[in-house]
Image (cartoon, rainbow, N blue to C red):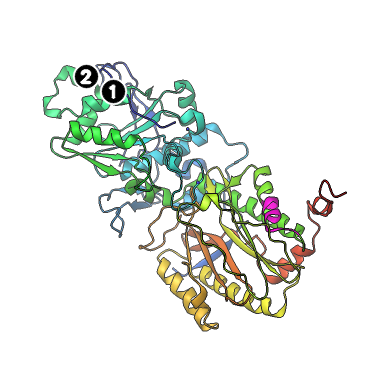
């Protein structure tokens, strides 16, 4: 929120490439090396951030090649919505095991072997979830500007990063093939980059030149009934894919653009998809997100730990910005303090920070942002803060590609007046009540209607609430997810609502919450939210206090 990629066509010639075997559907879990050469074949219960999680070994944390069936959770990729009706296979996931490992991960000094196992487990889940055919996930670049919602620069590449851990220059001209099969499953990375480095980072043993992707697909499109024994021995991967496809219905999942505008330039890989269909009319191209979204939606240990770190960094940025806030500062200056803390702590912006002042008489309506231009319009302006204003911040640091999303409010001057206090209490009561209802089995619409009813009963404030109760968070601040079905353990939500009368100050909150096996964990509760906490924060000396009180250059 790296250059357009075009697959070359060349001759068939490959032999002697090591194949990667994955055990799927049985006790198997992680990537494993094979010979593969030519000639070889409940009521809700709340937890708050910071509580200790009982330690568990890595072997019991969802990253090993075997998980006891009694402990493993099987999740289905069959959604209740229309997007995922083609996908229906189950994949292995246990929130308890992922949470136990997340508590032990050292994000500042990650163990390379453990990270390889974590990414292998992600690929294993996707292999289990692919209902038919195979999947290819290309490393892709930001092609279309002016999309309908903000994404970071590497949003289009998040699926590839999620499955490999490779990003930046090391991911250019790369693609990942996932092929579940009865005899053995294949995980193959095609890349124009350094193969040894790719093996070291990903743990994938079968790394091939990028040009060979076209060769393998071209050979595999031949109906399996026409394959001679010599050809099967010469091209074992292509033979396995051809056999998996059969004769009449050859399904191939590709990572179509997740964020696009039909009238703007197309990613070049769409031409490649169309060309494959012209050469094989039986080929059915499907969107890989139908399979990937349910896997990404249930977060593993690395995602959970990274989201918690993103929330921690966001909390520190908000705290430093609020400590420094004083009348006369601009919205943008408050924003810059928070954003600096995010970058200093090793994060980056999950989306542009928004800081706005709300006078007691309300804020005049500003110009609307045209669809697709959000990244070109500042969300924090140059208006100077005045005593008695309510300052609102909507912000989120991202860490390891996982973004927080938090909203908080501060009275400029450090103390709430009576009207601000009344509105604040209404909004905070709604926020805490909605969060308390989060549990497996609850639905988004139940939470939304609860907030709507409470705002209405508090004085008709539902009339001024124009958005929904929240969204999934993950690799995108507004992440992919199933908003129709019930919540499940391992999902991470952002809950947002507020009171915004047109003739008064605006008060709104947003908090990040993990759905657990027996309820939820409010991971952003450590960020001050109660009025007493906010007023105490405003009285504290901040790290930037001396700097913001200095006269700017040229005025001394």
Circle on res. 418? none
Most foreground residue, 320 or 485: 320
State the residue position of label 1.
9
Q: Secondary structure at mark 1?
A: loop
Q: Looking at the image, which residue is at 51% across and 45% down?
A: 152
Residue 551 lies in the magenta stretch: no
Within 10 angstroms of label 1, few (less than 14), some, or many (20 or more) residues? few
- Of the numbered discs 1 and 2, the one sitting upstream in the chain is 1
Q: Nearer the viewer, residue 521 or 429?
A: 429
Q: Identify which residue, 290 or 151, lies in the foreground.
A: 151
Task: Please state the horizontal and vertical placement of residue 361, each as a whole percent of the image.
Answer: 65, 76
Regarding mark 2 in the picture, which secondary structure is present there?
helix
Image position, residue 183 (x, y; %): 25, 32
- Residue 210: x and y in percent read 37, 24
Whole-percent x, y for residue 86 in the image: 25, 50
Residue furthest right as drawn = 556
Between the residue at mark 1 and the residue at mark 2, the CA separation in whole angstroms equals 23 Å
- Is-magenta flag for residue 333? yes
Task: Give the magenta range.
Answer: 329-338
**Left or right: 179, with 422 as reference point:** left
Q: Quadrant of residue 500?
A: bottom right
Tell me the residue that label 2 is attached to. 233
Up/down of 378 relative to 200, above or below: below
Q: Taking 220 as reference, is 127 above or below it?
A: below
Q: Residue at x 35, y 29 (%)?
A: 6
Q: Nearer the viewer, residue 142 or 534?
A: 142
Apparent side of residue 541 relative to residue 264 in the rendered image (left or right)? right
């Amino acid at each position: 929120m790296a250059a357009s990629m075009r697959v070359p066509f060349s001759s068939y010639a490959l032999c002697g490439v090591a194949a990667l075997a994955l055990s799927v559907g049985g006790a198997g879990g992680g990537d494993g090396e094979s010979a593969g050469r030519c000639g070889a074949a409940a009521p809700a219960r709340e937890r708050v951030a910071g509580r200790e999680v009982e330690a568990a070994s890595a072997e019991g944390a969802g990253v090993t090649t075997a998980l006891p069936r009694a402990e493993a959770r099987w999740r289905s990729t069959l959604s209740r919505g229309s997007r995922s009706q083609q996908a229906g296979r189950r994949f292995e996931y246990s929130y308890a095991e992922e949470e136990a490992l997340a508590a032990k991960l050292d994000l500042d000094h990650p163990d390379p072997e453990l990270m390889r196992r974590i990414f292998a487990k992600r690929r294993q889940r996707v292999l289990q979830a692919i209902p038919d055919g195979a999947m290819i996930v290309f490393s892709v670049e930001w092609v279309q500007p002016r999309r309908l919602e903000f994404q970071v620069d590497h949003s289009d590449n998040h699926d590839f990063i999620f499955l490999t851990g490779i990003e930046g220059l090391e991911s250019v001209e790369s693609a990942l093939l996932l092929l579940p099969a009865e005899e053995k499953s294949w995980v193959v990375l095609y890349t124009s980059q350094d193969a040894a480095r790719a093996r070291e980072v990903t743990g994938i043993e079968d790394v091939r030149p990028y040009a060979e992707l076209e060769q393998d697909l071209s050979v595999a499109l031949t109906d399996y009934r026409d394959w001679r024994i010599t050809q099967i021995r010469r091209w074992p991967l292509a033979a396995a894919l051809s056999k998996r496809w059969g004769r009449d219905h050859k399904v191939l999942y590709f990572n179509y653009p997740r964020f696009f505008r039909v009238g703007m330039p197309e990613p070049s890989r769409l031409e490649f998809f169309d060309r494959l269909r012209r050469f094989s009319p039986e080929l059915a191209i499907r969107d890989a997100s139908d399979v990937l979204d349910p896997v990404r939606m249930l977060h593993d240990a690395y995602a959970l730990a990274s989201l918690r770190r993103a929330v921690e960094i966001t909390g520190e940025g908000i705290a430093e910005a609020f400590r420094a806030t004083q009348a006369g500062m601009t919205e943008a200056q408050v924003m810059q303090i928070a954003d600096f803390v995010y970058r200093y702590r090793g994060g980056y912006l999950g989306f542009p920070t928004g800081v706005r002042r709300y006078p007691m008489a309300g804020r005049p309506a500003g110009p609307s942002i045209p669809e697709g231009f959000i990244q070109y319009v500042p969300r924090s302006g140059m208006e100077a803060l005045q005593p008695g204003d309510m300052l609102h911040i909507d912000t989120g640091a991202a860490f390891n590609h996982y973004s927080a999303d938090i909203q908080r409010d501060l009275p400029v001057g450090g103390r709430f007046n009576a009207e601000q206090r009344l509105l604040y209490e209404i909004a905070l009561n709604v926020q805490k009540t909605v969060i308390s209802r989060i549990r497996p089995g609850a639905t988004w619409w139940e939470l939304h209607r609860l907030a709507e009813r409470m705002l209405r009963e508090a004085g008709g404030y539902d009339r001024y609430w124009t958005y929904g109760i929240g969204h999934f968070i993950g690799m995108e601040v507004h992440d992919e997810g199933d908003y129709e079905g019930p919540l499940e353990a391992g999902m991470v939500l952002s809950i947002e609502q507020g009171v915004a009368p047109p003739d008064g100050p605006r008060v709104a909150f947003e908090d990040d919450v993990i759905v657990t096996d027996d309820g939820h964990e409010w991971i952003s509760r450590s960020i001050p939210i109660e009025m007493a906490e906010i007023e105490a924060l405003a009285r504290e000396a901040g790290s930037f206090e001396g700097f913001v009180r200095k006269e700017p250059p040229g005025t001394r």
